């Protein structure tokens, strides 16, 4: 089966891809990867993060804040990044929720997701695996998990059977 069906039709949902890290120090380099691959924050509104020790809010300071989430000094936070690219092809906007145990990536399905954009995204996800991440797509169901795993391993095409 093909991955294209999990990206091409905008049904109004925001499907999620979960990246878990058994070793929390890998969270910050994993989050920073999205910035290193051209991403810039286009989140709406004034960006605040919760400092857990004193239960106060402060301004989001960038990718280094992920290390503070991993060490339980900051609460989870969400950003929207534009311009991320795993190859020369820009991936449509991605939402990233930073949790102590990993990242949850959300995306809007639609016409902006062609086979080149999906392949570019897969390259990023493969790099996250190299950083120690475990990638899962429970949103897509059992068939989707199999399709996705095969595409990540390179044993199936993104657009053809």
Image (cartoon, grey):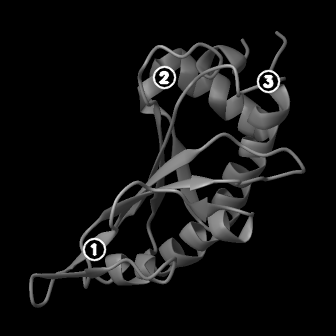
Give the structural element (helix, strand or loop) at label 2. helix
From the image, state whether disc 2 or disc 1 is nearer to you. 1
Determine the residue located farthest toward the left in the rendered image.
55
The spot of residue 76 in percent (x, y) is 29, 65
Identify the residue at image location x=63%, y=23%: 7
Find out whether the residues at labels 2 and 1 contact each other: C-beta distance under 8 Å: no
Determine the residue located farthest toward the bottom in the rendered image.
54
First along the sequence among labels 1 and 3: 1
Q: Quick check: 14 left or right of 134? A: left
Label at residue 49: 1
Label at residue 158: 3
Give the structural element (helix, strand or loop) at label 3. loop
Identify the residue at image location x=40%, y=54%: 44
Q: Quick check: 123 left or right of 129? A: right
Q: Nearer the viewer, residue 112 or 105?
A: 112
Find out whether the residues at labels 2 and 3 contact each other: C-beta distance under 8 Å: no
Label at residue 140: 2
In this rendering, the answer to whether 52 lies above or below 44 is below
- What's the distance in space between the residues labelled 2 and 3, CA to CA? 15 Å
Mark 1 closeness class: few <14, some 14–19, many ≥20 residues within 10 Å = some
- What's the distance in space between the residues labelled 2 and 1, CA to CA? 30 Å
Identify the residue at image location x=71%, y=43%: 91
């Amino acid at each position: 089966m093909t991955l294209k069906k999990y990206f091409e039709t905008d049904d109004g949902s925001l499907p999620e891809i979960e990246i878990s890290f058994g070793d929390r120090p890998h969270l910050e380099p994993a989050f920073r990867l999205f910035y290193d691959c051209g991403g810039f924050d286009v989140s709406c509104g004034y960006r605040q993060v919760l400092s857990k020790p004193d239960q106060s809010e402060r301004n989001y300071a960038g990718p280094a804040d992920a290390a503070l989430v991993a060490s339980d000094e900051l609460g989870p936070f969400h950003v929207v990044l534009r311009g991320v690219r795993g190859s020369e092809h820009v991936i449509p906007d991605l939402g990233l929720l930073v949790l102590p145990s990993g990242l949850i990536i959300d995306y809007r399905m639609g016409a902006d997701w062609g086979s080149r954009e999906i392949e570019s995204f897969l390259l990023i996800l493969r790099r996250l695996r190299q950083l120690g991440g475990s990638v899962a797509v429970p949103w897509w169901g059992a068939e989707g998990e199999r399709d996705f795993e095969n595409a990540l391993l390179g044993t199936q095409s993104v657009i053809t059977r």
